[in-house]
């Protein structure tokens, strides 16, 4: 049996054809990164327009590359939560039309659980029950996941997402968007201990939320003091840029790794699954690998293409299919985060 998974929650238009044994027959991702680069972040209105243009060609390509025909599909899966309203809407409408036209079931995919499931796909073995840490441009959340469809939100950012902080600090440092990979590259030449930036909530194991706005402000003060900022005109030496990037990255990594450990302690779980674009960060991965050995848990993540937004992780839809959890054709999108499965 075959399903097509459609993903359009943020700035990637993606589709994948996936067999019920988990085999990926095709995957297509049309990234909008270049489109949003000049604005230093995702512009929702531009994102939904770009999805409109790309959604049908992307679905078409996914089917062709899989070497099948539309009529061979047994189900249509689509990300309907969380994400940008206008972006989610495009995928949901396309999926509903396709499911209706083909007369096959429609399955709703929770994007954040799909990010956790990406670790299951990469590991090729069961990773549940686990704590899921989703760190991307739009989210920084910790979940307790009993199984792929059983989840509970343990904590989330109360302001910026980790990736958003990377992107904003990169802009201050005159580095291009997306900021994460550029900060990581520049930080290699810097001293992570040059500045002791704030690590909000780090020492409070009971509080599994995150906050990055204080860190962002601390970086700003370090660069321009408390006066007016005009980052474009600022002259920053290579050394200063590298030291700030390294110290900022160290603070984010320290908080993410520590809160993940607190979540493992609180839930008693032994597996940690990390997904989302920031999971690509080499320093974060190295720290979690060290922590896993030191504190006795298993750390799972996925290759970069499976960490950033994609439709392959829509393979989680087969779990819903097997559980008989189908969506009606009046399925709506939900921009906000769903907190629990029950
Ligand atoms: O999951 P993702 O592709 O989708 C969105 O949330 O849009 O994540 C993108 C985010 C961006 O904020 C980007 O700066 C960050 O992931 N990112 C990284 C790295 N690679 C991407 N952050 C830190 N280190 C990286 N190597
Ligand atoms: Zn995502």
Image (cartoon, rainbow, N blue to C red):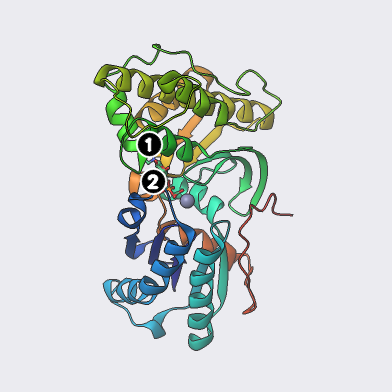
Query: Along the horizontal axis of the image, is 110 left or right of 280?
Result: right
Numbered circles on residues, count: 2
Query: Along the horizontal axis of the image, is 210 left or right of 165?
Result: right
Any part of residue 17 in sight: no
Query: Along the horizontal axis of the image, is 278 left or right of 255?
Result: left
Do the numbered discs 1 and 2 sit on residues whose CB atoms are within 8 Å? yes
Camera-side residue of 207 and 100: 207
What residue is drawn where x is 56% and y is 75%? 106
Residue 251 against residue 130 in the figure, above or below: above
Residue 170 lies in quadrant: top left
Camera-side residue of 179 and 294: 179
Secondary structure, mark 2, is loop
| Mark 1 neighbour density, 10 Å: few (under 14) some (14–19) many (20 or more) | some
x and y, in percent, of residue 227 in the image: 48, 23
Q: State the residue position of label 1.
A: 171
Query: Along the horizontal axis of the image, is 47 left or right of 341?
Result: left
Res 207 label:
none
């Amino acid at each position: 049996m075959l399903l097509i998974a459609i993903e359009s929650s943020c700035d990637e238009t993606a589709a994948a054809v996936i067999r019920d044994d988990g085999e990926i027959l095709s995957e297509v991702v049309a990234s909008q990164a270049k489109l949003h680069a000049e604005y230093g972040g995702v512009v929702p209105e531009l994102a939904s327009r770009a999805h409109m243009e790309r959604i049908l060609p992307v679905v078409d390509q996914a089917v062709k590359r899989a070497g099948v025909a539309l009529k061979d599909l047994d189900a249509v899966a689509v990300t309907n939560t969380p994400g940008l309203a206008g972006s989610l809407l495009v995928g949901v409408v396309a999926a509903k039309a396709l499911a209706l036209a083909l007369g096959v079931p429609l399955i709703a995919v929770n994007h954040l659980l799909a990010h956790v499931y990406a670790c299951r796909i990469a590991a090729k073995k069961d990773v549940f029950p686990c704590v899921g840490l989703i760190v991307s441009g739009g989210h920084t959340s910790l979940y307790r996941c009993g199984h792929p469809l059983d989840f509970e939100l343990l904590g989330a950012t109360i302001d910026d997402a980790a990736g958003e902080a990377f992107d904003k600090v990169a802009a201050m440092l005159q580095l291009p968007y997306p900021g994460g990979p550029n900060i990581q590259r520049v930080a290699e030449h810097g001293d992570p201990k040059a500045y002791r930036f704030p690590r909000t909530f780090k020492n409070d194991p009971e509080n599994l939320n995150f906050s990055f706005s204080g860190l962002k402000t601390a970086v700003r003060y370090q660069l321009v003091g408390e006066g007016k900022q005009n980052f474009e005109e600022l002259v920053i030496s290579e050394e200063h840029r590298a030291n700030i990037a390294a110290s900022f990255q160290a603070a984010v990594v320290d908080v993410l790794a520590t809160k993940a450990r607190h979540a493992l302690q609180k839930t008693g779980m032994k597996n940690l699954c990390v997904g989302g674009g920031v999971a690509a960060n080499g320093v974060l991965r190295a720290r979690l690998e060290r922590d896993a050995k030191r504190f006795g848990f298993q750390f799972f993540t996925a290759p970069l293409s499976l960490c950033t937004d994609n439709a392959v992780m829509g393979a989680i839809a087969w779990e819903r299919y097997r559980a008989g959890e189908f969506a009606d054709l009046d399925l709506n999108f939900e921009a906000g985060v769903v907190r629990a499965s029950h």
